[in-house]
Image (cartoon, rainbow, N blue to C red):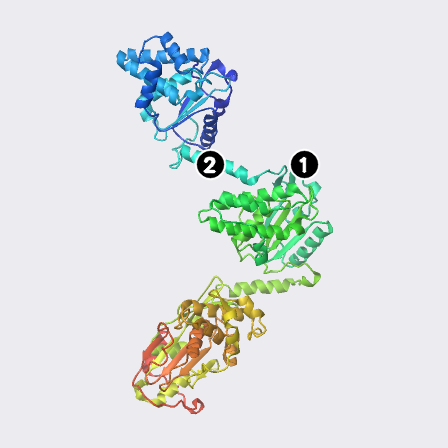
Amino acid sequence: MFTHIKIKNLNDFFTERDRRPEQGVYFYRINGYTEEIGQFIQKYYEAARLSGVIIEGKIPNPDEKNLAYYEEIMGMDFQMNRQFIAQSLKKWLPRMNDYQRENVAGAIYETLDMLRKSGKNDNMLKNAYIKFMCWLYYKFERIVNQLGEKKLPKILYEGEISSYELLLVTVLTKAGCDAVLLQYQGDAKYLSLDAGSSKSDNLVLPDMKEFPKDFNLKRIRTEIQNAVNQERIYGIKPQILNCTNAWIDGKGFSDFKKSITARGNDPGLFYNCFYRINGAEDKVTYVNELYQFQLELKSNRRHVVIVDEAIPMPTMEEIAAVKRRNYKKHDEMLMDLSANIQYTANIELQRLMVKAFVDVMLAEAKEPDSSLNKLTNKAVYMLCWLKRYQKELFSNWKMPDIGCFIHMGPCTNENETLFLRILARLPVDVLVLNPNLNTKCRLEDSLLYEITFPESLALCKYPQQSSDVHMGTAAYHAERELDGLMYQDTGIYRNQQYAKADSITLQTMYEEIPILWKEELKYRPNFSTENGVVTLPVIFAKVSGVKDGIVSKYWSAAKELMTEDTFVVKAVPFIDAAAPNPMKAFAAEFFKNGRVQKKKIKEHQSYPYSFLREEIQEHILDKLQLLIDQKTIRGTFENGTEYTIVATILNLPKEIVRLIQKFDFTKKNPKLIYFNTGEKMISLEDSILAAFLNLAGFDVVFFVPTGYQNIEKYFNTRPMEEHQIGEYVYDLQVPNMALVSSNTRPSWRDKIFRRGI
């Protein structure tokens, strides 16, 4: 029989019998975990699956059918001697040879004899013998004819082993097989059966810890199946591999310019680099350095692709060209979609592209927020871009050619980062340039090499032509640095410093309105500039009644609010619903699927705001979208009011457009004063205008001396603050405000509130 021997390392388990000392077998129990143990268990599981027995949970006791069949074949005779056991095994398990049978018979006899010496009677010994015979037949029959062979069979037991299970496993190891017990709960239960560890050895390795909570054979089985599925996904793998960055000197552009043949000479590898360079080494010469860099690459006949700011999104035609269907699993999806990668000019390059695509997408599938639908959409984008840039990067490709892909500016979305990670695993040098240190690049990858220089430069377009090269002098860059120091988080702002703004409506007392009205926005409460967006605290109010019933003071107070940036409405309605509006004909075209079609609007021949600053055009269209999304105006998404909103905002009065164009988000904001002294309701279009200007950053005040509900008709909510300031006065006519005398003497309340602001 075989003896139990100790291992020197875990790989000893996979050593063939003839190369082991003393013709020994290994029987170990594992009570802790390391990465090495995890890898060993997976390898041992695979060996047991192919040539052995895996037990998850208890070995079932023989049932009535098992015992009936045993009795039919063997009878219920039992003799406590080795020869009887050997003869019974020959009949019961005929596939064993004589050598195997003698070993098993001897081991069973020794075990039964040990039980007898411990006090078991003959009936107990017979029951144990029949249980062993049934277990050998129903659980271990597949390995009994392999016992003691050159390649020893394996037993893998998961859980807390029982007394008789331990006895039978010991019998089998003595007859010539290895065994491993996985004990996630520790060794206490086992030591109650084998206090001296005479039957098996406890595995002890450095840095062992508890098994992970989710660790079990089921998980290993899943991982093995996933690995098999991945092999199916990849198909035939390429014969060459990438050697990325292992050869570089870390000197930036010079690594990219290094000749392909000087990078390495292993025929099974292509040598590429994957870089991100933040900042500029010398901002005075940086632009010219970029220009000369791409000239040198092209003079060396390198295929170069340069993308400014962002990779253009796939077109509808590119997306439609990707063949796909409905999928239930991500591996099924990747295997099917990878068939879209075709490069018949070089099949090895095609295999490289498939491998890089699958590698990156499988890694993405493991992200916590990944779903099959999201992953499919990302995969389609990757395939579109791969096809788009194939010709430019790989035209007439052959080993060891290396193309170059330059991304000017930081990667700001996850699709771009995925695509660059795929390219970095192909015969392509990938370079991300992020000269502006105030911008963040989202690209992360274990292969990525990063350099950061101290100087920062705002540059969005790569200088590919001599006409693109605008060289700043040292004084120019010094001024830009000083500009940054003065206007960054100091409370001082340069003209038109910010391009984006969001308004918030202040809740005020009536007496605060004239105080805040003429102040710059930066002095108002809740003003802020975060992440390049200005928060604009604005006034949106309805003033009902006449203070103390004194009409002359009422008009004087209103006149005090009429600044040079104030637009005044005296006649109701201001915008008549029946008035001609050329934008109505295009409203349905400009608003589709709940979104303002910015690109289509800007490209349309009738677009009225093309002469405005680009950031102001964006501001107007953003607030138009916000006004619709908020459903402030009654009827939005109910009766087509959204199209009226679009037409109204794209046909603003020239005076208001000029006020918006002039608006500097950190200084005084433009105003709208709307007088409604009679009983007329304001129009839907007037309501749209007021709500839009509030979102755009205007202060808006309605003067309603009658107190009537004549401005609320078209609002779903009450967006403005209402101030009841005095008696209701009727039938007033708005006077010529130029003739109204100003009330410049502050009241005692004005004095109090001015002191508190």
Residue at 48% of width from left, 13% of height from top?
22
x and y percent of residue 155 in the render? 42, 23
Looking at the picture, tell me which residue is in the foreground, 302 or 281.
302
Label number found at residue 223: 2
Disc 1 is placed on an element classified as loop
Height in image: 152 above or below 102?
A: below
x and y percent of residue 734 in the render? 40, 89
Task: List the residue tagged with mark 1.
Answer: 267
x and y percent of residue 484 in the render? 54, 63
Q: Amino acid at mark 1?
A: Pro
Quarter that holds the C terminus: bottom left
Kindly report which numbered mark, 1 or 2, lies closer to the viewer in this rendering.
Answer: 2
Callout 2: few (<14), some (14-19), or many (20+) C-alpha neighbours within 10 Å?
A: few
Callout 1: few (<14), some (14-19), or many (20+) C-alpha neighbours within 10 Å?
A: few
Disc 2 is placed on an element classified as helix
Quarter that holds the N terminus: top left
Residue at 49% of width from left, 49% of height from top?
326
Looking at the picture, tell me which residue is in the foreground, 196 or 583.
583
Residue 432 shown left or right of residue 73 in the figure: right
Question: Residue at the front extreme?
Answer: 72
Height in image: 401 above or below 648?
A: above
Residue 124 shown left or right of residue 266 in the figure: left
Residue 10 in view of the camera: yes
Residue 513 shown left or right of residue 444 in the figure: left
Looking at the picture, tell me which residue is in the foreground, 72 or 753.
72
Height in image: 314 above or below 364?
A: below
Distance, label 1 to label 2, CA atoms, is 33 Å
Label number found at residue 540: none
Q: Amino acid at mark 2?
A: Glu
Looking at the picture, tell me which residue is in the foreground, 701 or 379.
379
x and y percent of residue 672 in the render? 44, 79
